[in-house]
Image (cartoon, grey):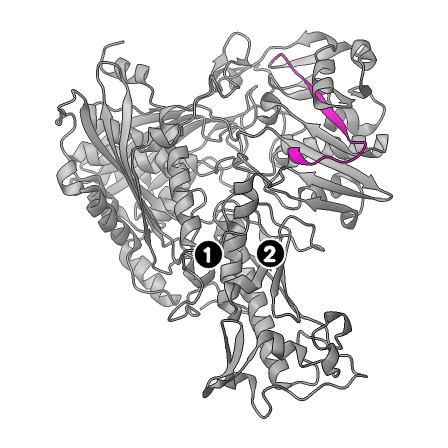
Amino acid sequence: MADIRPNEIPYYCDQIPEEYNVVGKTGMRRLDGYEKASGKAMYTRDYKFPGMLYARWFSSIHAHATIKSMDTSKAEAFPGVRYVLRYDDPHPVAGSRICPQKCYHEGEPMGAVVVADSEDIAEQAVRLIEVEWDVHDFAISFEDATAPGAPLAINPRASMINEIQDYSTNLMLGCVFFDFYPGQVLGDVEQGFAEADKIIEFSCSRQENQGHVEPHSSLCWWKDDHAETVIHSQGTSTGNSLAFIWGGNQSKVYSHPVYNGGLFGGGCMAQTYCLFGAMFLSQRLGKPIKAIMDARQSHWFSMSNDAGKMDFKVGCKNDGTITAVKMSTEFLQAMAETGMTHIIENTRIPNLLCDFKSAFVHRPYGMAFRSEQRPNTTAMSVLFGHVAAALDMDPTEVSLKNDGAHGHDTEWLRQFKLDHGFADRDSLSECVAVGREAMDWENKLHAPGAKLLSNGKYHGVGFTWTHSWSSMHEGGSVGILIRKDGSANIIGTHADIGVNAASSYCQLVAEEIGFLYKDVFFKPHVESGGFYMAVPGGGTNMCANGMALRKACKQVRDGILETATHVASQVVPTYHCDNLRITEPVFPGLNPEELDIKDSVVFEKANPDNKKTIQEVLASTSPHAWFAHDVAYDTQGPIFAWGYHSQGVMGVEEGRERISRQAHFAEVEVDTETGEIEVTKVVNVNDAGKVISPESFNGQQYGGTVMGISRGKYEEVIYDVSTGVRLNTNLLDYKYSTMRDCGPIDCHIVETNLGYGPYGAEGIAESCADVLASIIGPAVYNAIGVWLDDYPITPDKVLKALGKA
């Protein structure tokens, strides 16, 4: 067991209750349910303030160009326009950060910002701006960007890149989030190939897809010496963090992360500069400013990070054991992952080599929107699919044969679990067994191209797997306040992106302290005195924040029991006023260890009829009985504690193996005359570790499936290669899946307590959306007997593979 500080809840699963009162229960009232169902929920664009003005950016119309001259006179004279900020403004941040003179992709917000009485007026005025351009050469492909003399595509505004890039080449010098550099090796791939019975080679490519649906907007108003911000972000402290850029005090920037929709990521440059522009203009003009970006501008730094190509050389034995994998990548601005990480973390494959290459191009930057794990999950899908096909094996058997971690087998992984307090359970075996039964795998799996249906379409099934992950490196801090009326308040700033996180937190707090669910309250949309919870992304939503809540809950629970028995002269963390008399304890002669809390009632374990409500326990500390009901006359402060927790670098610290798994199955029908692919059934099996809120977990499975199938079948950004202009930015030409595109979605939960969150919980937020994006390929191969590894797999690609186009 790792060294643990006193009173700290450990990572590992030695504090799992034998039974749960609130956690894992269904039918809990959803805290945001009424507001959203009634249409009363307020999103960033819904907020209005007296005297508020609207700001809209000018956009580049070229992939790479510099403004030679700009005429804004017509815009300035347009009725209702109040101000125009230009790239040549003398303030040092105007041209460098808010509206620079040079662009690096088509649609980039730049040049000028128009401020007007309404959004419509600002938009019309922007169209009146006239620009003379100095147009530069551009590169939107990997080959063009890495050719000798290629124009540089590194945008100076992308501050995350500055730490690793020398600006002399478009080739990335590393992978921003992972310190993963070209040539990282596990074992000896050449020896692994020599030991193999069979060597196969194949390639896989993915086209760029956009990160989010809802365009960015931000609102700021200055009150004397501090700023108030309403932000469109899943990053709770975005406005607060901008104080560093501003050069001011963090305590003078207050963030209100209200309801978000269709964002699927946080912390991007477009989002940051949308708010930065609002803050700058509000301070300059002395008015509340709502800054708004359109869809094209919002895609800056929020495209997928998996656009590009992966080449594989794989050695395997006839029994399905993989002996070596060599990968060579050519990504476009992949800002988070390499494609190899899940293979390292999930398998016993002893010999691995990743020759990672990624180049900056004149496109919107790729980032961890809709997850950074797509390169890894795609690599897992195509790797195990191709090996199973080459050996004529069941792909589920190949997965089980190679399960492990860092080149070690499942026996090594079993010993790791036992050494660290986990149960001896095989997560992948359990997930595969549940999925095989749900899909009727024994009867539906067949030889490639062997099953023609009565409707004239070819039937196919596909399988893929990987681990569960909690992939954000942020920590979360949170406070818990127990009021005299017997209610508990969670204190923390947290963005709501629709995943029912607030309700889940209340379930966890009710479980930990012993409260009824109805007695726990949380209003996350306020700036909470420096308590910033981890962002709702990558499973950290529950893992980091849940562990922080457990730490705080332990303290307040102890405080309640100490107050009930008055065992301390100063109850911690409750604070007495030393000059006031404290009444007799409500449980005289007992110690805290002799009491318990359940359903918001404190009772004596040996005599459960001896009980008091939480309100009775806390109200008894007032020396004036006639004031006991009135919190305004309390003589003792409310019980309060806070907790902090971090999941480590991207959810994993050295020595913490990922040991919970997920398995997914898909069934398709392929029309070989039209190329159409119909997904007729999907089975999701996720090892949750422990589910806090089943409705929330299932919602992620369903929604992630729709999103994953969407990426596998439809989503791609199309460029005019002659101009670098995106041709399908709007949602008419850029295709998304709906529920009707996925057939029945059959969701299953396995609970092994093998995660690093509360009660062994594990993340779900990104899983289905990432993993299912590449399950279409194996399923289509099983249907028609031809591999299609260029995603999305569209009808024209099917027909071309069949020689019909």
Residue at (23% x, 26% y) in the render: 669
In this picture, residue 512 sits left or right of residue 750? right
Q: Which residue is mark 2?
A: 522
The image quadrant where one finds the N terminus is bottom left
- Cα separation, mark 1 vs mark 2, equals 14 Å
Q: Residue 252: x and y, percent?
A: 79, 47
Residue 473: image location, x then y, percent = 55, 49
The magenta stretch spans which residues?
A: 45-62
Quadrant in the picture for residue 674? top left
- Say whether residue 238 is visible: yes
Q: Which mark is residue 28?
A: 1
Q: Residue furthest bottom?
A: 589
Kind of residue at disc 1: Met
Magenta includes 46?
yes
Q: Is residue 186 visible?
A: no
Rendered position, 657 above or below 471: below
In this picture, residue 92 sits left or right of residue 430: right
- The amino acid on which the numbered mark 2 sits, given as a three-letter code, is Phe
**Callout 2 secondary element:** strand
Which of discs 1 and 2 lies nearer the camera? The answer is 1
